Amino acid sequence: MRSAIGLSDLPDPPSRAPIGRHVGKVASLTPCPRPAQHFRLRVASPGLLPAGPAVAFCFLCLVWTASGPAPLDSPPCERGLMAGARRFRFREEPGPGSDGAELEVRVPQVLHVQYGMYVWPCAVVLAQYLWFHRTSLPGKAVLEIGAGVSLPGILAAKCGAKVILSDSAEFPHCLDICWQSCQMNNLPQVQVVGLTWGHISKDILSLPPQDIILGSDVFFEPEDFESILATVYFLMQKNPKAQFWSTYQVRSADWSLEGLLYKWDMKCVHIPLESFDADKEDIAESTLPGRHTVEMLIISSTKDSSE
């Protein structure tokens, strides 16, 4: 059996036709002509922010400490810039066999040089998929990786799943944001753990078997792709029937997941957005995902013979 730790021991995957396109880098950090803790974030994708493509924004005063945001009476440069809460309201249209159910989720909206601390289009699409399949969630063990503001995981918890939120153990402020999302939605039972992709730590070893692993826009930095799949592979050893529900935003056609999926004994199914009412520019009373192209994937182990 392949080890999720020894990536170098694995053979190079054979060349195969692509089933998933590369989610390329959308932003880069360049020095800002201000003190060292300030950065200039250059957005390379149209529509991500209202100012348009290739426009440089100087996000000042966006520094979080290892134990969370600095006190509000501290100087602006010593605390993160919290833009308040963002509300998403998921609805089911009333009709035959439908009672017009709705669910509201609130998550913190944070401006930070760690651009993962933002509600991206992929998170809303994945949350919509969970909402569409909410009747299957009660009692399911669900882990969200790279959770950030945790919109999909929080929705799953509100639908009755036993949820664990995780983000990089190397960035404590990311875990702080996960906790804030739990507090905003009155979900004290949701656990938050630090997991670094590709690392086998005490926290990941102590996780119970998971039924569903969630990841929205985690296929962002190409150098992280194999570490993500190695982590998912390790989790699937505890439950071979577990599925990885993932959304990614198409930003480049130069990369494929096919080879890595083959290497890690995984298979992938693309889910049409129209099959869960996500083929529109606004979801959950928000302007996301806008005109971005988002794809929904269900990744599972080839060892799962239940299909």
Image (spheres, grey):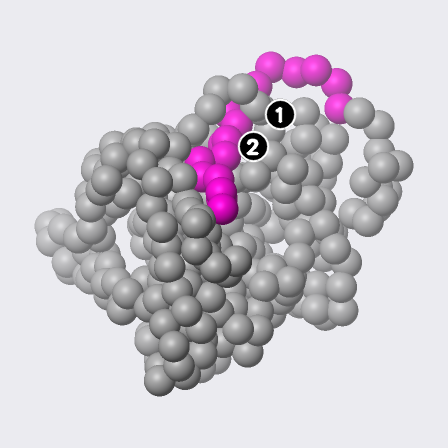
Between 221 and 249, the one lying in front of the other is: 221
The residue where tag 2 is placed is: 268
As drawn, the label of residue 242 is none
Q: Amino acid at mark 2?
A: Cys
Tell me the chief SS of the magenta region. loop
Which residue is found at the position 49% from the left and 76% from the top? Answer: 68
Do labels 2 and 1 touch, CB within 8 Å?
yes
Q: Which part of the image, by quadrant, shows the N terminus?
A: top right
Which circle, 2 or 1, is nearer the viewer? 1
Residue 85: x and y in percent read 27, 68
Which residue is found at the position 33% from the left and 76% from the top? Answer: 184
Quarter residue 275 falls in: top left
In this picture, is 229 found above or below 205?
above
Between 82 and 183, the one lying in front of the other is: 82
In this picture, is 147 found above or below 207?
above
Q: Amino acid at mark 1?
A: Glu
The residue where tag 1 is placed is: 258
Which residue is found at the position 69% from the left and 44% from the top? Answer: 227
The magenta segment: 13-31
Badge 2: few (under 14), some or many (20 or more) residues near its Cα, within 10 Å? many
Residue 66: x and y in percent read 57, 73
Q: Is residue 164 located in the magenta-colored stretch of the structure?
A: no
Left-right relation of 234 to 191: right
Quarter residue 277 falls in: top left
Between 229 and 169, the one lying in front of the other is: 169
Mark 2: secondary structure: strand
Q: Which part of the image, by quadrant, shows the C terminus?
A: top right
Residue 215: x and y in percent read 50, 49
